[in-house]
Image (cartoon, grey):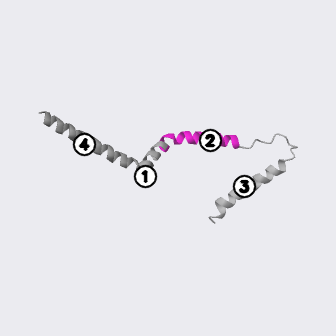
Amino acid sequence: MSRFIAYISLLISSVNFVSIFVVSIYMTTPSFENLVSEQVMKNIDWIVANELEKQIKKLKPRPVIDVNDPNKWFWDYIEKRNKEHIQRQTQGKWQ
């Protein structure tokens, strides 16, 4: 009876060793790494989007309050140039 128990315990420990070895090999493959990164990004995607939105709100230019601002011509020029660039990028390429 004790031999039977010894053989069963040897079989169980061998199966455990082989399964741990196979899992450790799988965990080093790029497919496992891609799977984990997809799962992580799926769960934190909304956090990244919220933080990005907060940072973009900080980057918006402040409206010009002073009508006599000496730099108003510069901001008008930049705004006009950006509009032309956006129009050229969105419409010019497709026509």
Compared to 85, does 14 lie above or below? above
In the image, which is nearer the foreground, mark 3 or mark 4? 4
Q: Which one is nearer the viewer's eye here, 94 or 36? A: 36
Q: Which one is nearer the viewer's eye here, 64 or 28? A: 28
Q: Is residue 58 magenta?
A: yes
Residue 40 image position (x, y, % from top left): 47, 42
Instruction: Say whether disc 3 or disc 4 marks the residue closer to the N-terminus.
Output: 4
Q: Amino acid at mark 2?
A: Glu
Q: Disc 3 and disc 4: Cα gap in Å?
A: 69 Å
Q: In which quarter of the view is residue 53 placed? A: top right
Q: Are marks 4 and 2 in contact (CB under 8 Å)?
A: no
The residue sitting at 36% across, 46% down in the picture is 24
Q: Disc 3 and disc 1: Cα gap in Å?
A: 44 Å
Q: Amino acid at mark 3?
A: Lys
In the image, which is nearer the foreground, mark 4 or mark 2? 4
In the image, which is nearer the foreground, mark 3 or mark 2? 2
Q: Disc 4 and disc 2: Cα gap in Å?
A: 53 Å
Instruction: Say whether disc 4 or disc 2 marks the residue closer to the N-terminus.
Output: 4
Residue ID for mark 2 = 53
Q: Are marks 3 and 4 in contact (CB under 8 Å)?
A: no
Residue ID for mark 1 = 30
Residue 3 image position (x, y, % from top left): 14, 36
Q: Is residue 6 magenta?
A: no
Viewed as shown, does residue 68 lie left or right of 3? right
Residue furthest out toward the bottom: 95
Q: Which dot marks residue 18?
A: none
Query: Which quadrant: the N terminus?
Result: top left
The residue sitting at 68% across, 61% down in the picture is 88
Q: Amino acid at mark 1?
A: Pro
What range of the chain is rendered magenta?
41-59
Viewed as shown, does residue 53 lie left or right of 82? left
Q: Which dot marks residue 14?
A: 4
